[in-house]
Amino acid sequence: MKRILSTYLNCSLGGMTSVYRARALANPNTHFDLVFVNDRGGLSAFTDLSNCNVRIINQSRLNGYLTYALGSLEYDLFTVTSQPDVIEQVPTPATTRVVYEIHSPIESIVAREVKTLNVSKIDEVWAPSEWAVSLVRSCLPRRKHVTINCHANLVDGTRFSADIETTQPLKARPDMTPIIWIGRMENFQKNYIDFLRALRLMPPKFYGLMLFSLEKDPGRLSAVLGSAAMLGVEDRIDVYLDVAQQDVGSLHRAARNAGGVFCSTALSESFGYGVLEAGKCGLPVAAYDVGPLNEHSIDNLSLVPVGDLPALADAMQGLAR
């Protein structure tokens, strides 16, 4: 059986947890050893997968553990994400192919990673879309030469599919139309403020389901609710915290059945998991036209220029049933 060792920082409810789970589902005859530094609530994503072994290893012990694993077992592939120091400090057998993965859509972060990445110790770099491949190439210093390939992320069809009947009950809002938004309580990338501004431009029958994860600071929630109050939409949002992936899919289908829409106001994307997962559930999508979103083949997808709030509000109303 083929064996793959992969490491990333956070085992969360989405992100690389979703990437690894989908890969394991698509390759049942491959064994995946997954090593994370922080448990962020995502361990349950792998409990139903017999071909996954998951470990949470303290940062101070990570390099030693990876060195031991690579020296004890025969791995066909070793993948590292967001940790260029691991590439530098962990010796890898010549028989194991080494891949460095870059999933960030933010140019400054990508530039910082590739600047310190020792490309002589890797076989190739993976990025999740053709757009992301172009970004990595543009950030790679001229003196560094490495193969960069598109290794597209996969969507978990056991959770995100229009054919699944399971739906998550929505909070009682008779005769109102739901709009799902997923992200963080910040305006640096996911940009919740533009969602609230667009919601303000829409008729009162529309309300937002805002799904947040990796949030522990009450002050950040207060800022979100304060912004909603300032915009006059505080009574038109429902806040969900740390929703499991299977429940996200169920919420998408419930919103679809209620004639709703998915909205993305992200200012940057390297793949666009949220958009694609919603689309796979049959939920229409309105989003800012960023990164590789126009590479996806989704029914009922409307992309608008970044910051064009009237166009975004019109797109959501047009897609709603």
Image (tube, rainbow, N blue to C red):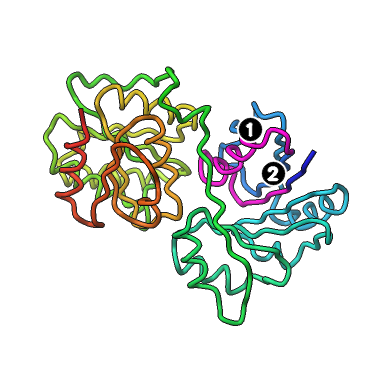
Give the number of the disc on residue 34. 2
Count neighbours of disc 2 (C-alpha within 10 A) and say few if under 14, some if 14 to 19, many if 20 or more. many
Residue at the spot of label 1: 46
Label pair 1/2, CB-CB below 8 angstroms: yes
83 is higher (above) or lower (below) than 224: below
- Residues rendered magenta in the picture: 5-30
Q: Measured from the top left, where is residue 305 in percent x and y? A: 24, 56
Image position of 279 (left or right of 286): right
Q: Amino acid at mark 2?
A: Leu
158 is higher (above) or lower (below) than 147: above
Q: Measured from the top left, where is residue 263 in percent x and y? A: 29, 41
| Mark 1 element type | helix
Q: Nearer the viewer, residue 24 or 201?
A: 24
- Image quadrant assignment for residue 147: bottom right
Image quadrant in which the C terminus is located: top left
Q: Measured from the top left, where is residue 76 in percent x and y? A: 77, 50
In reply to whether residue 206 is colored magenta, the answer given is no
Image position of 30 (left or right of 138): right
Count neighbours of disc 1 (C-alpha within 10 A) and say few if under 14, some if 14 to 19, many if 20 or more. some
319 is higher (above) or lower (below) than 302: above
In reply to whether residue 16 is colored magenta, the answer given is yes
Image quadrant in which the N terminus is located: top right
Image position of 10 (left or right of 71): left
